[in-house]
Amino acid sequence: MLKNYTKEFRYNLKLAYPVILGMLGHTFVAFADNIMVGQLGTAELAAVSLGNSFVFIAMSLGIGFSTAITPLVAEADGAGNKADGKSALKHGLVLCTALGFSLFGIILLCKPMLYYMKQSLEVVELAIPYLELVAFSLVPLIIFQAFKQFSEGLSQTKYPMYATILANVVNITINYLLIFGSFGFPKLGIVGAAIGTLVSRFIMVGYIWFLLKGKEKFESYVTRFNFKIIEKKVIKKIISLGFPSALQMFFEVAIFTAAIWLSGVLGKNAQAANQIALNLSSMTFMVGMGLSVAAMIRVGNQKGLRNFKELRRIAESIFFLTLLLEVVFAALFLLGRHWLPTIYLDVDDLVNQMDNTEVIIVAAKLLLVAAFFQISDGIQVVVLGALRGLQDVKIPTFITFIAYWLIGFPVSYYFGLFTEYKSTGIWMGLLLGLTASAVMLYIRFNYLTKKLIKN
């Protein structure tokens, strides 16, 4: 019985690992920024956290929306229909470019809100110039996402990984030169980190297009687009899948962003500690995201073949693999919770010693809670991927809203601001929301697949 699931592990990991490395690449950009900026002080680390909180919300909408391209391309590939695959990419590129510019504009309009959020004024002043540049980097990032989702829809998960690795090398190099003013370059502090992010994301788009164009299998897909002919039917299809997917990701990212803002109300040290725990959790979450893409591709293929028994077996094998991996991550967080935060701060800095010590103590408590929500977080994102492969997006959107905003957020708000739990209380709400989401989404998947098999 168990072998029915474990025999799929090798292929699932083969599909997922380039996506995991690619997604980790996005997180590693933030990881590198946080470690390098953390050497400047806790106020700078809190400023990057505050600036990125706005960008993450916008990014969640862009990335969530672009995921609509993958199941359409996977289904077209399963049915052997190349024209539909190219059409999904072309229309996806048009929508993702428009969305990138729109989100950049919205962030600029929202900038004055920073002064009305009860955040430390020192942190706000540092965050604004950083935010302006990183917000513009959303344009290339979301265009990259269109190419990435297309490539993954054809089960080719390596190319986005290569582009992300290159982007990381560029980002870290520019960070080193501009944050600290190395080798005669100007010392720009956190603005240097923003420039690194912006330049690396433009290079990422150019490189993935260059890679896909150079392969005979993809060349006809990614060249000779006729943007004069835009079909309303395809645009509607992508929006009908993409908009709910964007909302799903938005509801989850927004509750983590709310945690950043609530932590900011508690002070710059609470916010810096929250940023450390959040950055570490995001890296393990990317493993779930990679397996979620594998679930979306494989479920999409089986849907194209109309083989629903096999679809359910394959999806459940991915859920089981995710559970095993997340238990390992939970153990790592439990064992390393006191040491991991020290990577982010200069523990030998005597001037900021009291601040740094407080940040490390608070971050260790948050990692204790994060250890438990690893499992819920991994399961909910993978089941969500399987449901996207089935092109079931509306009910899951409703489920994620209930889990995060009717169950999780009220707990975070009350326990974080009105009890002695403070930062830990904020994260208890996150744990509850993720667990509710995982349970309800699995019930939905179970119901749908049984219904499809029966019919």
Image: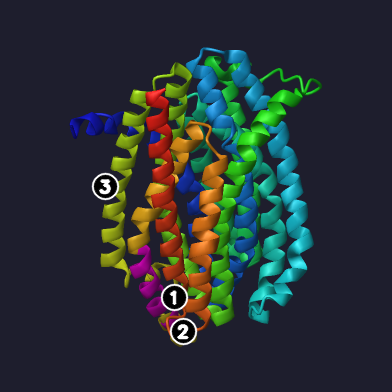
Specify the segment rendered in magenta.
Answer: 358-370
Q: Which residue is mark 2?
A: 419
Q: Nearer the viewer, residue 73 or 411?
A: 411
State how far apart marks 2 and 1 are (Cα).
8 Å
Question: Quarter of the image holding residue 309?
Answer: top left
Whether residue 185 is visible, yes or no, is no
Quarter of the image with the N terminus in it: top left
The mark nearer the N terminus, 2 or 1, is 2
Q: Which residue is mark 1?
A: 425
Picture layout, residue 313 above or below residue 101: above
Q: Is residue 338 left or right of residue 294?
A: left
Q: Are marks 2 and 1 in contact (CB under 8 Å)?
A: yes
Where residue 315 appears, as percent x and y from the top left, is 36, 34
Picture layout, residue 259 above or below residue 362: above
State how far apart marks 2 and 3 are (Cα).
34 Å
Question: Quarter of the image holding residue 299?
Answer: top left
Secondary structure, mark 1, is: helix
Q: Residues within 10 Å of mark 3 (few under 14, many from 20)?
A: few
Secondary structure, mark 3, is: helix
Picture layout, residue 287 above or below residue 343: above
Where residue 306 appears, as percent x and y from the top left, is 44, 19
Q: Amino acid at mark 3?
A: Leu
